[in-house]
């Protein structure tokens, strides 16, 4: 489950840049150097119990929010936006959809009709993708990941990677094994381009996917009593970024802090505000830039 409304269509030159970046990065996928993260890793890995994060998928990016990591729309954000966050010593996370098709994206025509399933509940402009046959739409997904790398993001949030769950009426017979295979492919593609990758919401497979993902992004796990799925990430010294919409901070922050989650309260539309973080702790030296 995730919540947001349709964003603006970006200028088409971003996809041209992504295609160029894909061609270049395919020749040298390991060029990025380690900036923080675990010793010996080639990409950032945020540890638990760090300062609050910001999640903004709509509106002009507000850099005044006192968050140490910003998760923003990968199409909407510019190279300048990401550079500006880095100048403020913030990390930048690239939101892209990989498990559903969006009719407002400039690459929408690159997904064959045969892989477009049911409408995504609550989002009439989106349809589920048949990730059991993701080879049929590898190209646009690779271009999206390359776009994130071209803009110098530190990490990627790949959305809608839990279509296998029975409550998601995708229109396809996506199995647990299909989802694991797809999610691991996404993780490899992101890592090959020198970025960290977040596991988004696929809690029932979190333990199996722990070795493949660098941190987790979770929605409403306190609301629905699902936070236990993500404790293995904390135990493995990997951050869990959590967001609640309905609960007030007083209803979940104590539990979030006890678990080591970096938790915030947001509204469903994911503009810059409201932004209500749980207790802000100083970022670990391994999470800071420099």
Image (cartoon, grey):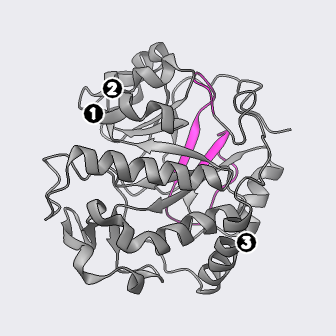
Residue sitting at x 63%, y 53%: 192
- For mark 3, give the secondary structure: helix
Quadrant of residue 116 within the rendered picture: bottom left
Which SS does the magenta portion mostly show?
loop
* Picture disc at residue 192: none
First in sequence, mark 1 or 2: give its number.
1
Mark 3 → mark 2, Cα distance in angstroms: 38 Å
Crowding near pointer 2: few (<14 within 10 Å), some, many (20+)? some
Quadrant of residue 31 within the rendered picture: bottom right
Mark 3 → mark 1, Cα distance in angstroms: 36 Å
* Picture disc at residue 24: 3
Q: Position of residue 49 (x, y in %)?
A: 58, 21
Mark 1 → mark 2, Cα distance in angstroms: 6 Å
Specify the farthest residue to the right: 290
Residue 71 appearing in the image: no
Say which residue label 2 marks. 229
Callouts 3 and 1 close, C-beta under 8 Å: no
- For mark 1, give the secondary structure: helix
Quadrant of residue 265 within the rendered picture: top left
Range covered by the magenta-colored residues: 46-70
Crowding near pointer 1: few (<14 within 10 Å), some, many (20+)? some
In front: mark 3 or mark 2? Answer: 3
Q: Position of residue 155 (x, y in %)?
A: 61, 49
Position of 105 relative to 282 (above/below): below
Residue sitting at x 66%, y 56%: 193
Residue sitting at x 59%, y 84%: 11
Q: Is residue 133 magenta?
A: no
> Would residue 143 be found to the left or right of residue 69 on screen?
left
Say which residue label 1 marks. 204
Q: Position of residue 215 (x, y in %)?
A: 52, 35
């Amino acid at each position: 489950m995730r919540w947001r409304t349709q964003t603006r269509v970006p200028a088409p030159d971003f996809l041209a840049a992504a295609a160029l970046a894909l061609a270049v990065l395919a020749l040298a996928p390991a060029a990025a150097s380690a900036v923080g993260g675990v010793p010996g890793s080639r990409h950032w890995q945020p540890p638990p119990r760090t300062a609050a994060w910001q999640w903004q998928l709509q509106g002009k990016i507000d850099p005044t929010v006192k968050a140490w990591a910003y998760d923003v729309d990968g199409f909407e954000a510019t190279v300048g936006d990401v550079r500006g966050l880095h100048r403020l010593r913030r990390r930048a996370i690239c939101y892209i959809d990989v498990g559903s098709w969006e009719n407002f994206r400039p690459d929408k025509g690159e997904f064959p009709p045969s892989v477009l399933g049911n409408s995504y509940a609550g989002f009439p402009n989106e349809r589920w993708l048949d990730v059991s046959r993701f080879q049929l739409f590898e190209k646009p997904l690779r271009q999206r990941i390359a776009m994130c790398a071209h803009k110098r993001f530190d990490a990627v949030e790949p959305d809608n990677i839990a279509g296998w769950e029975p409550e998601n009426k995708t229109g396809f017979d996506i199995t647990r094994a299909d989802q694991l295979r797809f999610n691991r492919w996404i993780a490899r593609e992101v890592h090959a381009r020198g970025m960290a990758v977040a596991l988004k919401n696929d809690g029932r497979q979190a333990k199996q996917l722990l070795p493949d993902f660098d941190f987790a992004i979770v929605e409403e796990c306190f609301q629905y009593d699902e936070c236990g799925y993500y404790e293995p990430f904390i135990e493995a010294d990997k951050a869990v970024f959590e967001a609640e919409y309905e609960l007030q901070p007083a209803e979940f922050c104590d539990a979030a802090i006890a678990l080591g989650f970096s938790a915030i309260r947001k509204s469903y539309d994911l503009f810059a505000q409201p932004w209500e973080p749980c207790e802000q702790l100083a970022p670990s030296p391994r999470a800071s830039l420099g």
